Amino acid sequence: MSQKTKIHLEGVIPATLIAFDENFEINESASRKHIKECALTKGISAITVNGHSSEIHACNFEEQKRILNFSLDEVGDTLPVINGVYADGSIEAAKIAKMSELNGASALLCFPPQSMSMGGHLRPEMAIEHFTRIADATDLPLICFNYPSSGNLTYPFQTLLQLFEKVPSIKAIKDWSNDPMLHEKHIKTFQNLQNPVNVLTTHSSWLMSSLVMGAKGLLSGAGSVIASLQVDLFFAIKNNDLKEAQKINDKIYPLVQVFYSPPFLDMHNRMKEALVLLGLMDKAIVRPPLMKLSIQEINALKKAIRQSGI
């Protein structure tokens, strides 16, 4: 299958969830329904599948392929679909990239290999090799997922500059540097290169501040619940309407305070529960080692939903 939809890596890009049944198997009908509802959000630029939000760490290659295919089947004719490339090894990552293009993805979100977590940030040649192998396997535009600057899975600033030079098919960065000063440096530098690389913020817990800095867009798991609010915020800031942006941000604030509270790894678990509370998903089942939220957490989500007015 050839690439279906031309993509511009900017604007609001929700990362979708995946529903599971009681046996922890993919609930395809519920997942399709959720993906379609996200895709119908007016004003979004694309959707992302097989990301953190869809528990990609717990899905094998065949399941990832299946998720991509039924997502494309639901929305691929009307909206670009970005597929995640999550693998510990570069050869496997290239295999996922090739499969994604063959099946009709419009772009790839490339995660850092967990195998680099013990100091890979000190070996820029590892990052260049990883992305070169992916780029050699596909003509699709790539999004580099950059992890927090405090951790060993980050690509330091100079490494990123080398990456963009050596692998010109990298057209955007999903910036999770988690450092406002560095984030602004990324925005000012990368978006003004001779071959610009758009910054898609994933700082959803301080989204308004990030967008005001000038990020060209956002790629966010919270978009699985509040894509319409993210669209409104993005365009309010784009139109320099600070008053309207603050008003929308006041609605977003209580939700992200709950979504991104410790432990951080439960963020998408909470988003599933929020969809259940909103009547948009029947069950919030996550694959182990993730566990069902406590009743206290679910009650906190109920309160945040009331406060946000969604």
Image (spheres, rainbow, N blue to C red):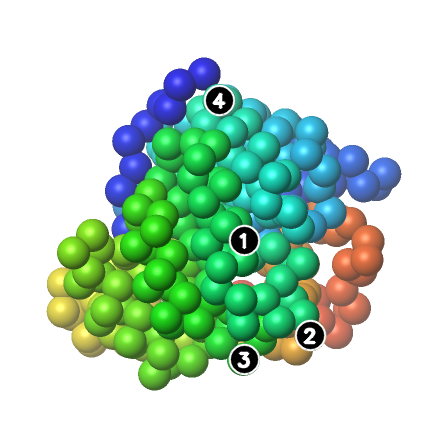
Can see residue 33?
no
Name which of mark 4 and mark 1 comes first in the sequence.
4
Q: SS for tag 3?
A: loop
Q: Residue at x 30, y 37 (%)?
A: 7
Q: Residue at x 49, y 40 (%)?
A: 134
Name which of mark 1 and mark 2 comes first in the sequence.
1
Q: Is there a contact, CB below 8 Å, between mark 3 and mark 4? A: no
Name which of mark 2 and mark 3 comes first in the sequence.
3
Q: Amino acid at mark 2?
A: Pro
Res. 68 image quadrant: top right
**Residue 148 picture location, percent across and down:** 51, 73
Q: Is residue 6 above or below residue 186?
A: above
Q: Of the numbered discs in the image, which one, if any, rests on residue 150? A: 3
Q: Amino acid at mark 3?
A: Ser
Q: SS for tag 1?
A: loop
Q: SS for tag 4?
A: helix
Q: Is residue 53 above or below residue 264?
A: above
Residue bearing the label numbered 1: 111
Q: Of the numbered discs in the image, which one, if any, rests on residue 308? A: none
Residue bearing the label numbered 2: 263
Q: SS for tag 2?
A: loop
Q: Quadrant of the N terminus?
A: top left
**Residue 246 picture location, percent across and down:** 28, 76
Residue bearing the label numbered 4: 102
Mark closer to the observer (1, 2): 1
User: For the residue carrying disc 2, how many other residues have a C-alpha within 10 Å: few (<14), some (14-19), or many (20+)?
Assistant: few
